[in-house]
Structures are given as structure tokens and as C-alpha cells.
Image (spheres, rainbow, N blue to C red):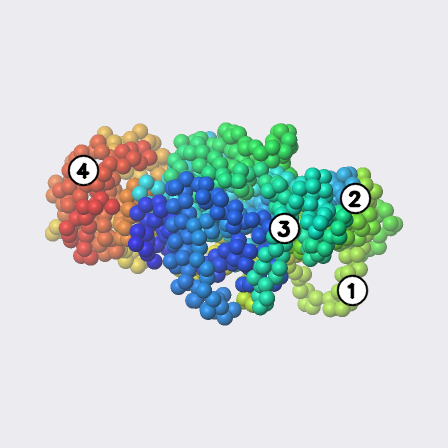
């Protein structure tokens, strides 16, 4: 796939690498490949942002369209785009241009379009500001607005004392883990970042793994679908960043009392008019739906449900009612609202990452950033409302110790004062414990430690809560034998929510019963009344899900408002015993010792389809739970359905770009690995994150053990390449320690340190090392690398078939003077047989002998480049399929 100034390669997992001539062409290619891969989802997102989704998805989406229209999503996006600098506008416009180039062709062939019979429907063109509109609309419900509406509802219905009791301190629709390991604790000696955003996954998910490269930049990251760049999770050659929801107050609610005077809706206190406009929202039926959009004092009025809206429209003369305004702290025309989409692509330091986020508007995120020089920073990116109700931005802090951000409330009282709906501290404490334990045990934190922590399934708080509630006598009298047996089984549960656990199933059934006990308590009856808000708000403000999310708070603080947590726990236990007895009587006991279901069998994950007419995706068994580090979330009392999950997992290693890893739960297989990303995600696997370009190599014979026969160099003189083994280390150490090998970069290293380097190469999938053997005797070291996986590949335009090489021959005293040219010819034949089209080298600029030797062998010199530890001189040699030299390329990449 390519355009006029960009082209796309795909790695074995199907992840696109957009390679472009400049940053604007890069955005265009990014838009095009996104439309090619996900045309249906892009159209859904655009329709939502433009308040047109009901026409595509069904009339049950009319309320969401009404909210998007009322919150002026598209108008806001236009203002943001118009206020942006010319470079940022061009970047956004190029992305939209790329979407438009590919969308029409991809639309008709999309599986979803054909299934729904929508081939005749022509998608609307993306405007330059459409990416901003998609971004704003996607995050309408991920800020603090849902939490503020819930707290207001509790306060109005039950009083202030109940707010703490029904406070879940848990993220509703978005959250994540973002951890930063400074270099002094890292196995690589450079900072490590690990992250996994927890989101509801629709279709292929909200994140798109993508690699982006152009002159002067090479980036890998998780793009937000519909937005260019990688503003949430990314890694350049020398800097990296990750975010997690800051759980911060991002808007304020303001109530106004209105009345009708002379048929006009006015604010009662001031007498000022409330602006009203009736709009027609497109629907799946033939006739549009008429809805009212209202503003006062320049602020949008939050739409209500059908009954509420009818009350406003039919409000009698002189009657009064209360409307809710949404007050945003954001400037109307922020010049850098989305600057980070472009600015991050060229960031080289942690400071430049933070600077790129200066002016970012929403969502407000906890940001961790680091660079290969060891600098580690933490801040909040975005504008929020402080404790005094004013717009504010956060300061930046050094992060020179293990930094774990998991949506928990900060310890600093000032920082905590403007946080809202934070997660309980369990996830953060568990991550700190696991990673600190690993550092204490082995002195360093490894990639495997980070991944193991991301996959941890211990539900930290609940074993203690179970013991507290169920230990001792029941307040309702003695327990029978069956109840005692079930209680003992619950008390022996160790908190594991592993997919294979059966005790986890019992715990969840009891927890669901406990949630129902609280739910049916008469004290909560005032919250059963209609909220006056549309159904789309139900997960955030209706009683059943909120009681489930607030179970820990109900247990901790319920007694203060007259609830009986221990009594509810024992009643839930008896309810479960009766339920099991009924199930046994109905279905009979399992035959032949059949085991009860595991948690993974009950708790499977299946990405949502946004249209009921689409074929469901397959499901996969997963472990974890809402407050596990593996936050595969359920809502207690609402069954075992897996709602929010880690929508991506990643590890960035600042020591080596090729050491970074990622995965998403995408159910669509676009690669060549024989499994979808979702299947590998469910198994806890991660893929290597590389800006992939098909590389050259060396041909080896099957069953040769990696040995490559180079043939006869002269009569009775035979050569071959043998993989470096431990037995080779003494001679290698002797060679690389000599003064003549100072440019090899290993002078002064011990034999153990040299061995560690070659052990690392032996485990690599992209860098390889061989001993050159002449008639069975070591005569040199030959190393190759795939440029897309090496820092050198960021310094020039990598072409298909490129192969990087390093060659160190044994001292002249132990080899024949004629060896160099004939060995060079033999190596050329070997790399040509492996599909290599061009050799790439980057000798140190001070190594004049090597540079002259390369020129004599037909290499063409390119520019000087800065690499870790040296300044190199690029050199290229093109070969034909036979290995013979052809006219060298003089483009220098």
C-alpha cells in the first residue's frame, strides 16, 4: 500500500509501518492505512462525532447523538482546528486526506458493510477538523462528568453522608496502569515504561498499533483510532511516554432555575434568555427526530430523557424547573489542544515529551515520560478544575524512584483535592509490591517482571473483607452444615482470580448476592426514582451498577448510615446455598465427577459489535477482575460479563528500540502468525514493536544448526559461518580487547561482559553473530542486523532487502593477506542468497581504514550519523541476486 509520498509495510503481526518523505505525508499515510484497515469503525466514530450515528446504527443511538449535538462537538473541533498553528492544521488535514483517499475503496469490501448491506451508502468525506471531533466525542463520558452527576444524585436523594458510602473510588469507563522504572532499577540500565489502558473494546478496539517514520523521526506507538500520531503511548528513538486517566475534575456542573415568560425560556434570577434551537437528528427511520439544543451564558444545557425534555418544552407560563449547565475550564480556542499529536513524533527527551503536551486539553491524563539519558518525569497533561473552581495545569515532577500510577488518589493533599472518582489503592499497592519484590530479589526489574505484574490476577482487598464479614457467628442465628461448608470454602479462598480458578467462581457468586442484598435495602429507595437523564447515562448513575461498584465503600462505611454489612454478607451466603440447592434439584449433580466451571469459562471476553446485525466476535477466556492488575472488569451484582479490559499492553525499553513490546485484543487477524492479536493477548503474549521493513539475510540450509557454508575461498581452503557459542568467547575476547579493535566498542570489557553481549545477540530475532571459520579455525566475527530493528535504521530511509553488517577479522598474523577480498566476495554471495538487496554499514568516522576498505569493496559513502556511543558514516552497497556488485546506489538511503 502506498501513496505519492508514503508507503506502508506490515510486520508479521500485521501492524502497519508508515514510511514517508515528511511529517505531513506521514499523517496522510497514517490516515490511509487506518481507513484501509478499519473503514467501518472510522465511519461509526465520524457519525457519532457529527451526531448522525442513529441513521447508521439504529434509533437507540439518538440520545447519544443529542448529547454530541448539545455539547457542540463538531463546532468545538472546528474552533480547535482553526486556532491551531499552521503546521498542526496541515498535519490534521493530511490525516483526513489520507482517510478520504482510502475510505471509499475500503468501504465496499468491508465485512461489516457487506453483512449489513450498506455497499450503496457512500461515507461522508472527513473534514480537516474531523479527527478532533472524533477525539472530543470519544471522551465525552470519560471525564469527571459522570461521577459528578452520580454524586449530585446521591446528595439530593439521600444527603451528604451517603456520598462517601456510595462512592466507588473506581474508574467508570477508562483507567489504566502506567508504571515507570528508572534506569538504576532497570535490567537494561535505562528507564522502562509499562502501561495497559483499561477500556471497553468495540470492534478492533480504541487503539491501533502503528509505526511511523520520516526523515528525522522513527516512532512506534498506540494511535487513538481516528486521530493522527500517538499521543497516549509512544516511543521515539530516545524518548517514551505513557498515560493513565488522572481521575481529575475536568468540568463543573452549574444548576439554573428557569421559567417561561411570554413563551420564552429564561433564567429566573437574572431574567436572561436561555437560547433554544430545535434540530433534526437523522434516524434509521424515514423521518428525523426533533430535539432541542439549549445554551445559557454560552454554556450547553445537559439534555434530559424524553419525559424531562417534554417538561422543558411544555413548561407552563410562570412555572419553574432546574436545568444543568456543563462548564468546561478549557479556553474556547486553545491553540495547542492537539499539538502533541505532531509534536511528540520528534521528541528526543523527557522534557520535550512534557513540552509537547503543553496546551493539551482533554482528557486530563497522568503522564510518565523518560529518555535514554535516564531522565524520568511525571505530570498531569490536560486542563482541569482545581479546588477553587478555576482552570489549572499541573507542575512536572522528577520520577527518580519506581513510579506506579494506577488511577489511585495521590498522597499529596493539594494534588488530591481536585481528583474525583479515583481507583481504590489496591492495584497500585499490588504493583508496587510485585515490582519492589522483584528488585529486591534480583537487584533489577526486568521486562518479564513488568509483564507478570500486568497479568497478575490477585484481588488484593477481598480476602480480608470476606474474613471480616463471615468470620464468627451469623447475626441471624446458627448456620446449617451446608452454609458452614460454603463459608469455609470462601474463607479459604486466597484472592486468586486466575482463569483456571473454581474458588473465584464461588466468590463472585457470593459477591453478586451481597450486592443484591444492598441493592434491595429500603434505605436506597429514593435512588430508584427516574433520574431524568437518558439511558446512555445508566451505567454511571443508575442504582444497580453503582451499588456493585461501591461494595467496598458500603462495607467500610455502611454502618454509619444504618446499613448492616455483616448481616447482608450472611444473608448473601444463605441465598447462595439455597440457589445451589435449587440448581442441583433442577439439573442434578454433575456426573462422573465432572468439575464445576472455572472463572475463565464464566468470565470470557468478547469485543462489542456496535450494530446488532453484525456477526459476534469469538470469545476468549480471561482471568482477573475489576481491581486486579489484570483489570478484566465486572460489575458486582450484574453477572460475570467481562466489560472493561486492558485495551493494549506495552513495555517501552529506553536502552534499545528493538526491545519494546506491545499487543492489543484485536479480534481481526491481519498478519501472518496464524492467530489474532486477541488470542495472543489472552495468552499473555506480547509482540515485538518494530517499524518493520522486510530485511535481507543469509541463506542457511535446513538442519545445518545455523551454520552457513561459504564454499571454497581457494583450492583446499574452505570457509563457513558458525553461530557464536560459549567456546568461542576466549578468542573473541582476545580479538575485541586489542587496540586495533577499539572501534568494535568492547575494549576494556571482561570476558563475562563480552559473553553477555553475545548471549543477548543469540536471543535476538533481528541481530545475529557468527564466527568466520577458515578450514575449521576462527578467522573473524561477522555480525548482521535488520536495520528496522537497529538505531542505524532511524538515520536513513530503510529499503526492502537492506541488511546491516559488521566484520572484524582476526589479526593479520593469523590469517592470509589475500583473505579479505575473497571472503568479502563469499559473504556477498551468501547475503544475496538470503534475499539481501543492499548492504548497510556505519563504521565509526574515526575508523578511516575501515571506511577506505569499504570504498574499495564498492560501498558508496553516505552522511555522518549520530548513534549511541559513536558518530558513524553510513555506507551502502547494492548487490544483484548472484551476489555480484552492481552500480552502487548513491542516494545514501
Q: Position of residue 566 (x, y in %)?
A: 80, 45
Q: Which badge, 4 or 3, is on the more N-terminal residue? A: 3
Of badges 3 and 2, the one in the foreground is 3
Q: Is residue 332 left or right of residue 825?
A: right
Q: Position of residue 519 (x, y in %)?
A: 77, 52
Q: Which badge, 4 or 2, is on the more N-terminal residue? A: 2
Graded by Cα atoms within 10 Å as few (under 14), some (14 to 19) or many (20 or more), the crowding at tag 1 reads few
Of badges 4 and 2, the one in the foreground is 2
Label 3 and label 2: CA atoms lie apart by 33 Å
Does the CB distance between marks 3 and 1 fall below 8 Å?
no
Label 1 and label 2: CA atoms lie apart by 37 Å
Q: Is residue 263 left or right of residue 676?
A: right
> In terms of depth relative to the viewer, which is nearer, 628 or 484?
628
Whether residue 172 is visible: no
Whether residue 87 is visible: yes
Q: Which badge, 3 or 1, is on the more N-terminal residue? A: 3
Graded by Cα atoms within 10 Å as few (under 14), some (14 to 19) or many (20 or more), the crowding at tag 3 reads some
Graded by Cα atoms within 10 Å as few (under 14), some (14 to 19) or many (20 or more), the crowding at tag 2 reads some
Q: What element does badge 1 sit on?
A: helix
Q: Which badge, 3 or 2, is on the more N-terminal residue? A: 2
Q: What element does badge 3 sit on?
A: strand
Q: Which badge, 1 or 2, is on the more N-terminal residue? A: 2
> In terms of depth relative to the viewer, which is nearer, 779 or 601?
601
Label 3 and label 1: CA atoms lie apart by 57 Å
Does the CB distance between marks 1 and 4 fall below 8 Å?
no
Label 4 and label 3: CA atoms lie apart by 75 Å
Q: Report the disc number at residue 582.
A: 1
Amino acid at each position: 500500500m502506498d501513496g505519492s509520498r508514503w508507503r506502508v509495510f506490515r510486520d508479521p503481526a500485521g501492524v502497519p509501518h508508515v514510511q514517508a518523505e515528511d511529517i505531513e505525508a506521514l499523517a496522510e499515510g497514517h490516515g490511509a492505512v487506518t481507513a484501509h484497515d478499519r473503514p467501518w469503525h472510522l465511519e461509526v466514530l465520524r457519525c457519532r462525532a457529527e451526531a448522525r450515528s442513529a441513521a447508521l446504527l439504529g434509533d437507540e443511538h439518538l440520545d447519544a447523538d443529542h448529547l454530541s449535538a448539545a455539547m457542540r462537538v463538531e463546532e468545538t473541533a472546528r474552533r480547535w482546528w482553526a486556532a491551531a498553528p499552521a503546521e498542526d492544521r496541515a498535519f490534521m488535514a493530511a490525516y483526513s486526506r489520507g482517510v478520504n483517499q482510502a475510505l471509499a475503496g475500503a468501504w465496499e469490501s468491508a465485512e461489516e458493510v457487506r453483512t449489513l448491506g450498506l455497499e450503496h451508502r457512500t461515507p461522508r468525506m472527513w473534514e480537516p477538523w474531523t479527527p478532533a471531533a472524533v477525539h472530543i466525542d470519544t471522551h465525552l463520558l470519560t471525564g469527571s462528568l459522570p461521577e459528578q452527576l452520580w454524586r449530585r444524585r446521591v446528595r439530593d436523594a439521600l444527603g451528604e453522608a451517603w456520598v462517601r458510602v456510595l462512592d466507588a473510588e473506581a474508574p467508570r469507563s477508562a483507567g489504566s496502569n502506567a508504571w515507570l522504572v528508572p534506569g538504576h532499577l532497570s535490567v537494561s540500565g535505562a528507564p522502562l515504561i509499562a502501561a495497559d489502558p483499561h477500556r471497553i473494546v468495540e470492534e478492533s478496539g480504541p487503539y491501533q498499533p502503528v509505526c511511523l517514520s520520516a526523515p528525522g523521526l522513527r516512532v512506534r506507538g498506540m494511535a487513538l483510532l481516528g486521530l493522527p500520531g500517538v499521543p497516549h503511548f509512544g516511543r521515539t528513538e530516545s524518548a517514551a511516554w505513557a498515560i493513565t486517566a488522572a481521575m481529575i475534575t475536568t468540568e463543573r456542573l452549574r444548576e439554573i432555575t428557569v421559567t417561561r415568560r411570554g413563551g420564552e425560556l429564561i433564567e429566573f434570577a437574572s431574567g436572561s434568555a436561555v437560547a433554544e434551537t430545535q434540530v433534526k437528528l437523522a434516524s434509521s427511520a424515514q423521518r428525523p427526530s426533533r430535539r432541542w439544543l439549549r445554551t445559557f451564558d454560552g454554556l450547553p444545557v445537559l439534555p434530559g430523557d424524553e419525559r424531562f425534555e417534554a417538561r422543558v418544552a411544555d413548561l407552563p407560563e410562570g412555572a419553574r424547573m432546574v436545568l444543568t449547565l456543563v462548564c468546561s475550564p478549557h479556553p474556547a480556542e486553545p491553540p495547542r489542544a492537539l499539538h502533541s499529536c505532531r509534536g511528540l513524533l520528534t521528541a528526543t527527551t523527557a522534557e520535550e515529551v512534557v513540552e509537547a503536551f503543553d496546551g493539551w486539553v482533554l482528557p486530563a491524563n497522568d503522564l510518565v515520560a523518560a529518555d535514554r539519558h535516564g531522565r524520568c518525569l511525571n505530570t498531569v497533561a490536560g486542563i482541569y478544575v482545581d479546588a477553587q473552581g478555576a482552570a489549572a495545569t499541573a507542575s512536572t515532577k522528577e520520577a527518580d524512584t519506581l513510579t506506579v500510577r494506577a488511577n489511585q488518589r495521590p498522597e499529596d493533599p493539594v494534588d488530591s483535592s481536585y481528583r474525583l472518582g479515583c481507583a481504590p489503592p489496591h492495584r497500585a499497592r499490588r504493583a508496587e509490591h510485585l515490582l519492589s519484590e522483584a528488585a529486591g530479589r534480583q537487584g533489577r526489574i526486568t521486562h518479564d517482571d513488568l509483564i507478570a505484574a500486568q497479568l497478575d490476577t490477585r484481588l488484593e482487598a477481598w480476602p480480608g473483607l470476606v474474613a471480616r464479614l463471615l468470620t464468627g457467628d451469623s447475626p441471624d442465628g446458627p448456620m446449617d452444615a451446608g452454609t458452614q461448608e460454603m463459608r469455609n470454602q470462601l474463607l479459604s479462598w486466597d484472592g486468586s482470580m486466575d482463569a483456571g480458578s473454581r474458588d473465584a467462581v464461588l466468590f463472585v457468586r457470593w459477591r453478586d448476592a451481597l450486592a443484591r442484598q444492598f441493592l434491595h435495602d429500603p434505605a436506597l429507595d429514593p435512588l430508584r426514582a427516574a433520574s431524568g437523564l437518558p439511558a446512555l447515562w445508566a451505567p454511571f448513575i443508575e442504582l444497580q451498577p453503582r451499588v456493585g461498584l461501591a461494595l467496598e465503600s458500603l462495607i467500610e462505611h455502611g454502618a454509619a448510615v444504618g446499613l448492616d454489612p455483616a448481616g447482608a454478607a450472611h444473608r448473601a451466603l444463605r441465598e447462595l446455598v439455597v440457589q445451589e440447592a435449587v440448581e442441583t434439584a433442577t439439573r442434578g449433580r454433575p456426573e462422573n465427577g465432572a468439575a464445576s466451571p472455572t472463572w475463565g469459562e464464566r468470565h470470557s471476553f468478547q469485543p462489542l459489535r456496535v450494530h446488532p446485525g453484525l456477526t459476534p466476535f469469538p470469545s476468549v477466556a480471561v482471568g482477573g477482575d475489576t481491581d486486579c492488575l489484570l483489570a478484566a472488569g465486572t460489575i458486582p451484582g450484574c453477572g460475570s460479563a467481562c466489560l472493561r479490559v486492558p485495551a493494549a499492553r506495552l513495555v517501552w525499553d529506553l536502552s534499545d528500540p528493538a526491545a519494546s513490546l506491545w499487543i492489543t485484543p484485536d479480534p481481526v487477524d491481519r498478519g501472518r502468525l496464524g492467530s489474532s492479536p486477541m488470542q495472543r493477548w489472552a495468552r499473555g503474549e506480547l509482540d515485538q514493536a518494530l517499524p518493520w521493513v522486510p530485511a535481507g539475510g543469509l541463506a542457511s540450509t535446513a538442519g545445518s544448526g545455523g551454520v552457513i557454508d561459504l564454499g571454497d575461498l581457494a583450492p583446499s581452503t574452505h570457509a563457513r559461518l558458525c553461530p557464536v557459542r560459549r567456546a568461542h568467547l576466549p578468542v573473541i575476547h582476545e580479538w575485541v580487547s586489542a587496540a586495533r579493535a577499539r572501534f568494535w566498542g568492547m575494549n576494556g570489557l571482561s570476558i563475562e561482559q563480552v559473553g553477555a553481549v553475545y548471549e543477548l545477540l543469540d536471543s535476538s530475532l533481528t541481530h545475529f553473530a557468527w564466527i568466520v571459520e577458515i578450514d575449521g579455525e576462527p578467522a573473524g566475527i561477522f555480525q548482521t542486523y535488520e536495520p528496522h530493528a537497529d538505531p542505524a535504521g532511524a538515520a536513513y530511509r530503510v529499503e526492502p532487502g537492506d541488511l546491516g553488517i559488521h566484520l572484524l577479522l582476526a589479526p593479520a598474523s593469523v590469517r592470509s593477506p589475500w583473505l579479505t577480498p575473497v571472503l568479502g566476495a563469499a559473504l556477498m554471495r551468501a547475503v544475496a542468497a538470503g534475499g539481501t538487496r543492499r548492504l548497510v554499514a556505519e563504521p565509526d568516522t574515526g575508523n578511516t581504514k575501515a571506511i577506505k576498505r569499504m570504498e574499495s569493496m564498492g560501498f558508496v559513502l553516505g552522511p555522518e550519523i549520530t548513534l549511541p556511543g559513536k558518530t558513524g558514516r553510513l555506507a551502502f552497497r547494492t548487490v544483484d541476486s548472484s551476489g555480484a556488485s552492481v552500480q552502487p546506489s548513491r542516494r545514501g538511503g
